[in-house]
């Protein structure tokens, strides 16, 4: 004989979430793969079992419910217990010592969770509307906590937990609403349909991976966006300042480009070359940062995150005015253009100057400059474009690494721990360095080793892998044009190739980071074509606005 709904347990159906589901990423992934092979089946005394047996027919379940007398049934008691259980989970989260300290740090009233406990202490939840109001207050508090992750720091576990607590709050409110309308077939149908949808998504392997991936990226881009704001010029003065700083960056890169050519001329083994090239790149990027210069191609990973943050400027995972986004894109584009121009001009000029100095010193033949080889490496071709794109991928990755480290410094309170660690001699200098420059330092070093070791991938993959970077490539053109007489056509082709490399570096790095940043904030792909069409139309009408900053005080980042 088939069991009737009145004989079944509604408790797990109401609470929906189980503490047994609170596992880490690896365990969750493995368990979902296992359940794809051997699906989980609900206990035969539950409503979930009843729905499975009846092909998730919500109306069949409702038809068996006696809605007129349901308030006196065991179902109503289990509903009360489920509401209390979810609220207690929420309260336990808010009364945790670590969460209490973060609430205090953000000046959020800590007593809201204690008030929630007092509202559910009674046998019957009589103050239903007061309970909903209190849950709304707590939902707002947790949302503020999540929004201010830059101030308090965040890790993947904390992000997952706060999201789960928000789900508890939302579910508790849904159950209170059901309790207020316990005799309503419409409310029961809505509750059952939500459960059916949740059950279908719960075991989804793809959804599990995507959600955790998005959370990790969101942690990172929150910090890279803060760093990116200083790479977007707001005024003509800042625009000129970017140009001067990019000139410094170009000069330093020209020096290290010569050092790379010199190191490569010794014909060492591949691993020795990879190590030397990596150190050369890393030291170059660190010194540019230390002396206050700008490397244009390192900016896109930061500015793309800033752009995404401003697209979702209310932090509600909803994009705002396209016109405002367009203004910001123009600022990003013009800032990147002037930085690329400064790097390009100074790298070329400084390379020529360095060669003249070497020629005056009579050591030009010892530099190992092979003009024909260098020009071939820069001139436009399919491999050069692919190598420039590879560099763009590494530029984006290094920006994400920088943001990840900055986030961990805040979330783990590294600076405080260093300044109080005997092992580090309680060094306040080291603590301050890690806090202020640690992320950038690690990002620069990682980028150096990515670029320096990239060619080794050719031995592992069935195709050649290498990188092309605009400032280094431009320097190679400078050294080549001074070392050998180049025809004007060859020179123009080489310079065009260097510019093309810069454009590819920028577009790939910017696109990857922007895509990840938008995805992490829940902005869907259909939005991108709409934005793209608007940008193309505006670019055709006002092309100079994307290269020369048009100062507009009313539209600041």
Image (tube, rainbow, N blue to C red):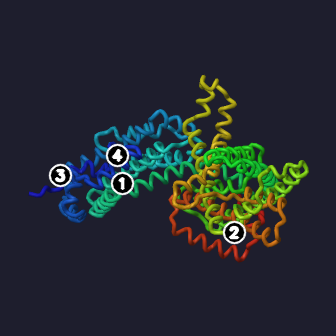
1 vs 3, front mark: 3
Work out whether mark 1 precedes mark 3 in sequence or the reverse, and give the earlier one: 3
Work out whether mark 1 precedes mark 4 in sequence or the reverse, and give the earlier one: 4
Q: 457 left or right of 254?
A: left
- Which picture quadrant has residue 468? bottom right
- SS state under label 4: helix
Work out whether mark 4 precedes mark 3 in sequence or the reverse, and give the earlier one: 4
Tell me the distance, in whole angstroms, between the alpha carbons under discs 1 and 3: 25 Å
- Which picture quadrant has residue 380? bottom right
Query: Can you name the residue that lies furthest to the left here?
Result: 1
Q: Which residue is mark 1?
A: 174
4 vs 3, front mark: 4
Q: For residue 371, which numbered disc appears in the image? A: none
Front residue of 141 and 337: 337
Q: Residue at x 84, y 52 (%)?
A: 364
Q: Are marks 2 and 1 in contact (CB under 8 Å)?
A: no
Tell me the distance, in whole angstroms, between the alpha carbons under discs 4 and 3: 20 Å
Q: Where residue 253 sits in the image (x, y, percent)?
A: 76, 51
Front residue of 235 and 291: 291
Q: Residues within 10 Å of mark 2 (few under 14, many from 20)?
A: some
Q: Which residue is mark 4?
A: 21
Tell me the distance, in whole angstroms, between the alpha carbons under discs 1 and 4: 21 Å
Q: Are marks 1 and 3 in contact (CB under 8 Å)?
A: no
Above or below, 131 against 422 in this view is: below
Q: Are marks 4 and 3 in contact (CB under 8 Å)?
A: no
Q: Residue at x 61, y 74 (%)?
A: 533
Q: Where residue 375 sits in the image (x, y, percent)?
A: 74, 63
Q: Which residue is mark 3?
A: 44
């Amino acid at each position: 004989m088939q069991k009737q709904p009145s004989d079944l347990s509604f408790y797990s159906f109401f609470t929906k979430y189980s503490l047994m589901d609170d596992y880490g990423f690896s365990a969750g992934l493995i368990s979902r793969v296992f359940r794809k092979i051997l699906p989980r089946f609900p206990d035969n005394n539950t409503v979930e079992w009843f729905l499975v047996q009846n092909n998730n027919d919500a109306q069949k379940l409702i038809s068996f419910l006696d809605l007129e007398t349901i308030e006196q049934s065991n179902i109503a008691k289990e509903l009360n217990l489920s509401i209390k259980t979810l609220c207690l989970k929420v309260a336990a989260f808010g009364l945790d010592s670590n969460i209490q300290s973060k609430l205090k740090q953000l000046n959020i009233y800590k007593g809201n969770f204690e008030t929630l406990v007092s509202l559910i202490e009674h046998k019957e939840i009589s103050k239903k509307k007061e309970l909903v109001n209190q849950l709304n207050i707590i939902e707002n508090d947790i949302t503020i906590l999540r929004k201010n992750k830059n101030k308090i720091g965040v890790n993947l576990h904390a992000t997952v937990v706060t999201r789960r607590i928000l789900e508890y709050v939302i579910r508790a409110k849904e159950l209170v609403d059901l309790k207020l309308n316990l005799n309503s077939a419409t409310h029961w149908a809505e509750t059952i349909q939500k459960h059916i949808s949740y059950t279908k998504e719960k075991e989804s392997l793809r959804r599990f991976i995507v959600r955790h991936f998005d959370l990790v990226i969101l942690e990172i881009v929150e910090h890279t966006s803060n760093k990116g704001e200083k790479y977007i010029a707001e005024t003509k003065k800042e625009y000129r300042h970017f140009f001067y700083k990019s000139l410094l960056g170009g000069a330093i890169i020209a020096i290290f480009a010569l050092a790379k050519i010199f190191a490569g001329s010794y014909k060492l083994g591949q691993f020795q070359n990879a190590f030397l090239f990596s150190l050369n790149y890393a030291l170059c990027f660190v010194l540019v940062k230390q002396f206050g210069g700008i490397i244009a191609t390192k900016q896109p990973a930061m500015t793309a995150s800033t752009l995404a943050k401003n697209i979702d400027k209310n932090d509600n995972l909803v994009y705002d005015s396209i016109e405002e986004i367009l203004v910001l894109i123009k600022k990003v584009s013009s800032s990147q253009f002037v930085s690329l121009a400064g790097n390009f001009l100074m790298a070329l000029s400084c390379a020529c100057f360095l060669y003249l100095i070497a020629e005056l010193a009579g050591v030009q033949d010892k530099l190992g400059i092979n003009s024909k080889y260098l020009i071939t490496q820069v001139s436009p071709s399919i491999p050069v474009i692919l190598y420039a794109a590879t560099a763009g991928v590494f530029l984006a990755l290094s920006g994400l690494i920088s943001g990840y480290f900055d986030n961990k410094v805040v979330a783990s309170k590294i600076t405080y721990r260093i300044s109080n660690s005997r092992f580090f001699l309680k060094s306040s200098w080291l603590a301050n360095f890690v806090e202020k420059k640690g992320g950038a330092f690690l990002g620069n070093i990682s980028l150096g080793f990515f670029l320096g070791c990239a060619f080794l991938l050719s031995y592992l993959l069935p195709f050649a892998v290498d990188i092309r970077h605009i400032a280094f490539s431009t320097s190679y053109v400078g050294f080549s044009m001074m070392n050998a007489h180049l025809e004007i056509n060859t020179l123009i082709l080489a310079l065009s190739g260097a510019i093309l490399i810069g454009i590819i570096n920028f577009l790939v790095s910017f696109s990857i980071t922007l895509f990840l940043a938008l995805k992490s904030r829940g902005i869907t792909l259909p939005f991108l074509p709409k934005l793209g069409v608007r940008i193309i139309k505006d670019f055709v009408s006002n092309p100079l606005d994307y290269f020369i900053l048009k100062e507009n005080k009313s539209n600041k980042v």
